[in-house]
Image (cartoon, grey):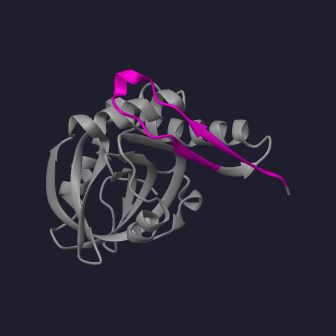
Amino acid sequence: MAFSVAALAVPKQYGPVSWGLLGVMAIGSLKRAIKRVTLALGVSVSVFTVAPGDVQSFDFSRYRPLAIGELVKNYPAQEGLAIVPDIPIRAKVLYFAELRDLPDDSRRLIVAWAESMNLPRVPQVFQREMKISEAGIEYWVPVQEVLVPFLKAELRPGEEIELFMIYIGQVYGRHVLLVNEFEHKSPHRGRVH
């Protein structure tokens, strides 16, 4: 099978940029991958506008188990913004029940990534990030705003949850993963599976 490597430049308006590896994929599959990403995130975005919290159409199977720490090892730190394509992962983490406004540098990366993927509505979906921990390392990850009420209602600080995230790249060496969904052991209230 033949493979190609594609890289993506980010417009100057987003600050200093590193060339981010878009991925190694079979020749001719880039368009299919972008369409798949658009459809997957389009479903996530439509969840907000049609029925907030309804995860019935969420495709859990496209998220492969991968520890955040392993992902970080696979993508060494880069300067400026580095964009990668949609890399869906699922990871078990501890939930802290702490939220904060999305930092400007993370917002710039999300906007640049969304523009590169032709997903103009995605930046509005992520307004805050939540604190999580994996293997004793703390991370702040942007979370879809529609999930926040469910996180608050269903989870307790220190509870183990499984997050369904998309790795979109780095900003000044800090890895950014977008939280699209979560699962936990206790039954969901108000969400349909």
Name which quarter of the figure residue 29 lies in: top right
Magenta range is 2-23
**Place of residue 60 in the rendered image (x, y in percent of width and height, measured from the top left):** 53, 59
Q: Is residue 131 left or right of residue 13?
A: left
Specify the farthest residue to the right. 1
Q: Quick check: 87 left or right of 94?
A: right
Q: Please indicate, yes or no, whether residue 57 appears anywhere in the rendered image.
A: no
- Position of residue 192 in the picture relative to residue 135 (left or right): right
Q: Is 83 placed left or right of 97 in the picture?
A: right
- Closer-to-camera residue (180/175): 175
With respect to residue 60, does 142 lie above or below? above
Q: Residue at x 36, y 31 (%)?
A: 123
Q: Is residue 78 magenta?
A: no
Q: How far across and down, in percent of the image, does residue 45 sit? A: 44, 36
Residue 12 highlighted magenta (yes or no) = yes
Residue at (15, 50) in percent of width and height: 99
Name the residue nearer the viewer: 112 or 40: 112
Q: How far across and how far down the image is residue 161, in percent?
A: 32, 69
Q: Give the percent coordinates (x, y) of residue 124.
A: 33, 29
